Amino acid sequence: MILDERTEFADAFSVAVAASTIIVGDVLDLGAAGQDPGNGEPLYLVISVDTEVITGGVAGTIQFKLVSDSTADLATSETIHFLSKAFVTDDAGANDAELNAGGVPVAVALPLEGPVYERFLGVKAIVATTTITAGNVSAFLTRDVSKWKAYANLIGA
């Protein structure tokens, strides 16, 4: 499967925000409620770290969740399909290792059972305790997480 804008939520999206919950990048329109995002095949959510996620002196946490909703702003009555653990954000020495550049805090199969997917699908980041001062993540869907590999951006190289 070739990844394109229809399977990518975010590419080097900044999560440098005050404590809050934000949408990470774009929201995918599944076309209608009840659609299987993988069309009968396994599909995986991958979130990778492009630039280390750190805070300014006080440790905090960041958590990721995959949600669907009836509206594109994911603010009506979100359905949670996946919720990651809370990762510690601090400096490079005290961060959870998954938040260092090149880390992969999330690589998980989208659930095929459980709550029905609503029309719009997106990723949210829950930043708690303190402000994240730096950090970029990419989030996308792939059919085979074992063969997924990050490549350097060659455009303009």
Image (spheres, rainbow, N blue to C red):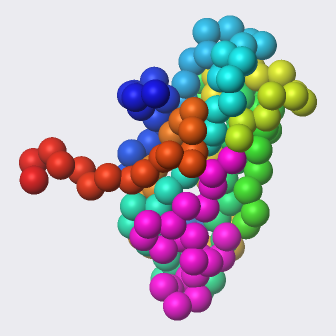
Give the residue furthest to the right.
114
Return the residue nearer the eye: 25 or 47. Answer: 47
Give the residue furthest to the left.
156
From this viewpoint, is residue 18 visible? yes
Looking at the picture, does residue 18 appear above or below residue 27? below
- Is 20 magenta? The answer is no
Q: Identify the residue at image location x=69%, y=47%.
A: 108
3 left or right, relative to 143: left
Determine which quarter of the picture holds residue 141: top right
Q: Identify the residue at image location x=63%, y=51%.
A: 107
| Magenta highlight range | 87-108
15 left or right, relative to 125: left
From this viewpoint, is residue 74 visible? no
Return the residue nearer the eye: 60 or 66. Answer: 66
45 left or right, relative to 51: right
Q: Identify the residue at image location x=87%, y=28%.
A: 113
> Residue 89: image x %, image y %?
59, 76
Determine which quarter of the picture holds residue 74: top right
Looking at the picture, does residue 140 appear above or below residue 116? below
> Residue 138: image x %, image y %?
45, 50
- Is 91 magenta? The answer is yes
Give the residue furthest to the top.
32
Q: How many marks?
A: 0
> Residue 97: image x %, image y %?
57, 77
Q: Identify the residue at image location x=39%, y=66%.
A: 51
Return the residue nearer the eye: 42 or 27. Answer: 42
